[in-house]
Amino acid sequence: MTAVDLAARVFLLLSGPFVGDFVATLASAWPRAPRPILGRSRCARCSAPIAPARAIPLVSWALQRGRRGCCDGRIPIVYPLGEAAGLAAGVAALLAPSLGAAVWLYAALMTLAYVALVDLRRFSIPTWGLAALATLAVIAVIAEPRMDEKLARLATGAVLALVFELLRRLVRRGGRAGLGEGDVMLAGILGVAVNWRLAAPMVFVAALAPLAIQFARRKFGPTPLGLWLSISTAVFLAAATFQPAPQ
Ligand SMILES: [Zn+2]
């Protein structure tokens, strides 16, 4: 690893929680644009400026016990979740096998965090999140050296989109469905972004994790499936990066 390579990775690691906080700001403002995008951050509740010392990702949230310093309102859970996801993206970038893989993984995990947080709050998949993931999926296909693996990725995306579209038509009759067109597109794009070997376990975990949680809490209701697809994909993408490539 060269000095430049190491410096770039350390930058990704240190910036991770701050970028994750910004991702959470975007997700909590969706479908509006956050205001102001740049400049000093302000409390979304009482518009008091937030001192930089109170804006340290995760640390400030933990020290203030999840409450705002200005008006004692609760800090929405998307902020610590986004900051933790950003930290995880930074750690993944530090450990990735190449700098290219580190940057791709960092961008993919941040985008997945954005999609997951919007779906958690609004039961909707943001179009810009889909567009960013589609771009990352295209890059993954272009970077794939083997032609058969390129085709396998595209086929995996097509199969996942088809399966989710069939499921969507099946559950739509049940009134408020936890599965929408955004989830179908998300599944197709993620099928291209991950290796085909990971596609089946990725969907399996995404489908079973919310069911398991609902059984454990004995509370049932619609599940934001895009949230669980994003989490599951993030875990499998990060895990796959650290394995040696199959010969
Ligand atoms: Zn406030």
Image (tube, helix red, strand yellow):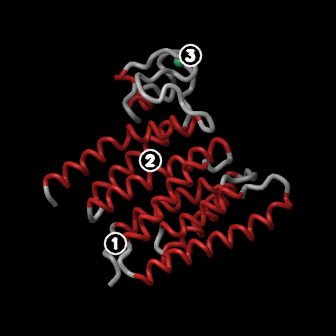
| Residue 74, picture quadrant | top right
Q: How crowded is mark 3: few (under 14 residues within 10 Å), some or many (20 or more)?
A: few
The part of the image, by quadrant, that contains residue 245 is bottom left
Three-letter amino acid code of the residue under disc 2: Ala
Q: Residue at x 32, y 41 (%)?
A: 15
CA–CA distance in space, label 2 to label 1: 21 Å
Mark 2 touches mark 3? (CB < 8 Å) = no
**Residue on which disc 3 sits:** 46
Instruction: Residue 122 in the image: state x and y as whole percent.
Output: 67, 42
Residue 164 picture location, percent across and down: 68, 68
Q: Decide: is 55 above or below 223.
A: above
Q: Mark 1 points at which residue?
A: 243
* Residue found 44% across the figure and 56% down from its top: 108
Q: Does the residue labelled 1 lie within 8 Å of ligand 1?
A: no
146 left or right of 99? right
Q: Mark 2 points at which residue?
A: 85
Q: Which residue is found at the position 63% from the left and 61% from the top?
A: 185
Q: Which of the marked residues, 3 or 1, is nearer the chain's N terminus?
A: 3
Ligand 1 is within 8 Å of the C-beta of the residue at disc 3:
yes
Quadrant assignment for the C terminus? bottom left
Task: Assign a secondary structure to mark 2.
Answer: helix
Of labels 2 and 3, earlier in sequence is 3
Measuring from the top left, give residue 167's x and y in whole percent: 74, 68
Q: Is 144 or 234 nearer to us in this picture?
A: 144
